[in-house]
Image (spheres, rainbow, N blue to C red):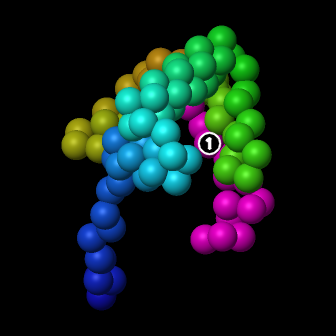
Amino acid sequence: MAAATAKVPTVSLKQITADLADKQGVAKKQMAETIDAFVASMTKQITKGNKVRVPGFGIFGVRKRAARMGRNPATGEAIKIKASKKVFFRPAKELKEAI
């Protein structure tokens, strides 16, 4: 039996920006610039290989995945999968408990 899946709404960064601007009493444009700078700074640190800890939210970072053998699901043929880097997110205890 398939479980019923409810459509979960997606909140955009623009909506979050507007909400924060209203709560902080600043212009939306100023809040958008602040959030853009925050995201750019996080991206810069993560691409350098650093972890970024956001207290109460979680940790962002990069993990290296080794090269490995896999299978083409259509043909069953063995294929080599290249080594890669993946972004990870580990939620903070407060976020886990809030959910």
Relative to residue 50, is residue 76 drawn left or right? left
Q: Position of residue 91 (x, y in %)?
A: 67, 52
Specify the amino acid type for callout 1: Phe
Q: Which secondary structure lies at badge 1?
A: strand
Name the outermost residue toward the top: 48
The answer to whether 51 is drawn above or below residue 47 in the figure is below
Total of numbered circles in the picture? 1
User: Residue 17 is drawn in which quadrant?
Assistant: top left
Residue lying at the far left of the rendered structure: 74
> Which residue position is annotated with label 1?
89
Q: Can you see residue 16? A: no
Is 93 magenta? The answer is: yes
Question: Where residue 34 sits in the image (x, y, percent)?
Answer: 52, 28
Q: Quadrant of residue 4?
A: bottom left
Q: Position of residue 41 (x, y in %)?
A: 60, 19
Is residue 25 or residue 33 the one in the foreground?
25
Magenta stretch containing residue 39, yes or no? no
What residue do we see at 71% from left, 30% from top?
52
The residue at the point 65 percent across, 17 percent down is: 45
Residue depicted at x 30% and y 77%: 5
Residue situated in front as seen by the camera: 76 or 37: 37
Could one spot residue 21 in this view of the protein?
A: yes
* Magenta stretch in the rendered image: 87-99
